């Protein structure tokens, strides 16, 4: 079994919209907690980033099947929980940690099945 580095590099692009979602949520949380109301620089930046993310996502859907690309978006949930915990001192329960493990396991299982069926 050989490794197709070009194909694997293409999968790294699926992380871009995940990162954009996480950054937008971070900015949105900061903006939502400002004293000047919820329409401010941070929330505007979050909305603009989500708009750009949508364009990136649709471009990626031209290259990947939806069933292949969509599971990667669940990584955003993991990163948002971690940022909430470390940056905003939000609680992180045992159930949420178990959910993180289940998401990672699901993505791994999905990716390995996809890799086997592509050979």
Image (tube, grey):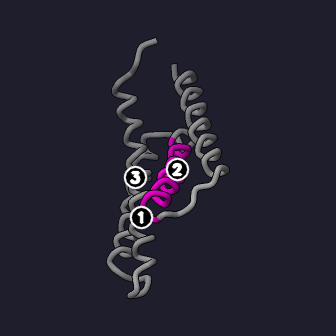
- Residue depicted at x 56% and y 32%: 108
Q: Which marked residue is nearer to the observer: mark 3 or mark 1?
A: 1
Q: Is 40 in front, or is 82? A: 82
Where is residue 63 shown, x and y percent of the image? 42, 40
Which circle marks residue 89 in the picture? none
Please identify the residue farthest to the right as the structure is shown.
95
Which circle marks residue 26 in the picture? 1
- Residue depicted at x 56% and y 29%: 114
* Circle 2: element type: helix
Q: Main secondary structure of the magenta part?
A: helix
- Circles 3 and 1, Cβ within 8 Å, touching? The answer is no
* Circle 3: element type: helix
N-term mark: 2 or 1: 1
Where is residue 28 shown, x and y percent of the image? 43, 70
Q: Is 86 in front, or is 23? A: 86
C-alpha span from label 2 to label 3: 11 Å
**Residue holding disc 3:** 19
Where is residue 86 shown, x and y percent of the image? 44, 57
Q: Is 50 in front, or is 35? A: 35
């Amino acid at each position: 079994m050989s490794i197709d580095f070009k194909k694997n590099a293409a999968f790294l692009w699926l992380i871009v919209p995940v990162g954009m979602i996480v950054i937008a949520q971070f900015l949105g949380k900061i903006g939502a907690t400002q004293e000047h109301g919820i329409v401010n620089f941070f929330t505007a930046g979050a909305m603009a980033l989500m708009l750009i993310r949508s364009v990136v996502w649709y471009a990626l859907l031209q290259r990947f099947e939806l069933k292949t690309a969509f599971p990667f978006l669940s990584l955003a949930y993991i990163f948002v929980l971690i940022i909430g915990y470390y940056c905003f001192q939000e609680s992180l329960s045992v159930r949420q940690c178990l959910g993180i493990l289940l998401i990672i396991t699901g993505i791994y299982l999905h990716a390995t099945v996809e890799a086997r069926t592509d050979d």
